[in-house]
Image (tube, grey):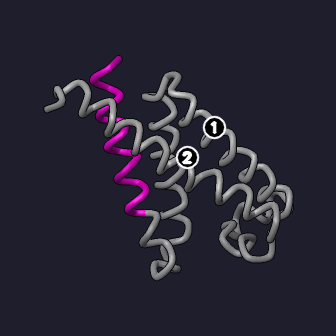
Amino acid sequence: MISEKEENVLASFFLRVGLAIAFIYAGIAAFLNPEAWIGFIPGFARSVIPASILLHIHSVFNVLLGIWLISNKKIFYASILACLAMVAIIVFNYSALDIVFRDIAILFAAIALTALSYQRR
């Protein structure tokens, strides 16, 4: 039987890896196939900065956030950032709910990681 602390470490590990895979995949996929991702950039943002530049910035952000999550350093802050990123994606793409519904599950995984990592702070 494993202790509660060991359970939390294991849960944190799986949440971190799962979130990291989602963020890293999205970042790399957007670099490799930008046409498939550029439509998710909100119109108001496109009017300020070209969509291709925003997509590259967001892709780099996703990959760096994924690496941060895997690093297990200051995970509370990384998970808060993951939550904020997912809320923004959901809010700005709510009209595509048939696709974005998966992001709601990712958001709740990030919330769970935030709760677990808050206990460790």
**Residue under label 2:** 20
Q: Position of residue 82 (x, y in %)?
A: 50, 44
Q: Residue furthest top?
A: 121
**Residue under label 1:** 67
Q: Is residue 111 left or right of residue 87?
A: left
Say which quarter of the image contains residue 2: top left
Q: Residue at x 40, y 63 (%)?
A: 104
Q: Confirm whether the magenta stretch covers residue 40.
A: no
- Looking at the figure, which quarter contains the N terminus? top left
Q: Confirm whether the magenta stretch covers residue 111.
A: yes
Q: Residue at x 45, y 37 (%)?
A: 80
Amino acid type at circle 1 is: Ile
Callout 1 secondary element:
helix
Q: Position of residue 92 (x, y in %)?
A: 55, 65
Q: Position of residue 102 (x, y in %)?
A: 44, 69
Callout 2 secondary element:
helix
Within-10-Å neighbours for mark 1: few <14, some 14–19, many 20+ = some
Q: Residue at x 24, y 33 (%)?
A: 7
Query: Who comes first in sequence, dot 1 or dot 2?
Result: 2
Q: Residue furthest front?
A: 1
Q: Residue at x 54, y 61 (%)?
A: 89
Residue 43's disc number: none
Magenta stretch in the rendered image: 104-121
Q: Is residue 24 left or right of residue 31?
A: left
Nearer to me, 70 or 81 = 70
Q: Position of residue 81 (x, y in %)?
A: 52, 39
Nearer to me, 28 or 114 = 28
How many angstroms separate mark 1 from mark 2 (CA)? 7 Å
Within-10-Å neighbours for mark 2: few <14, some 14–19, many 20+ = many
The relative height of residue 70 versus residue 47 in the rendered view (above or below) is above
The relative height of residue 3 versus residue 26 in the rendered view (above or below) is above
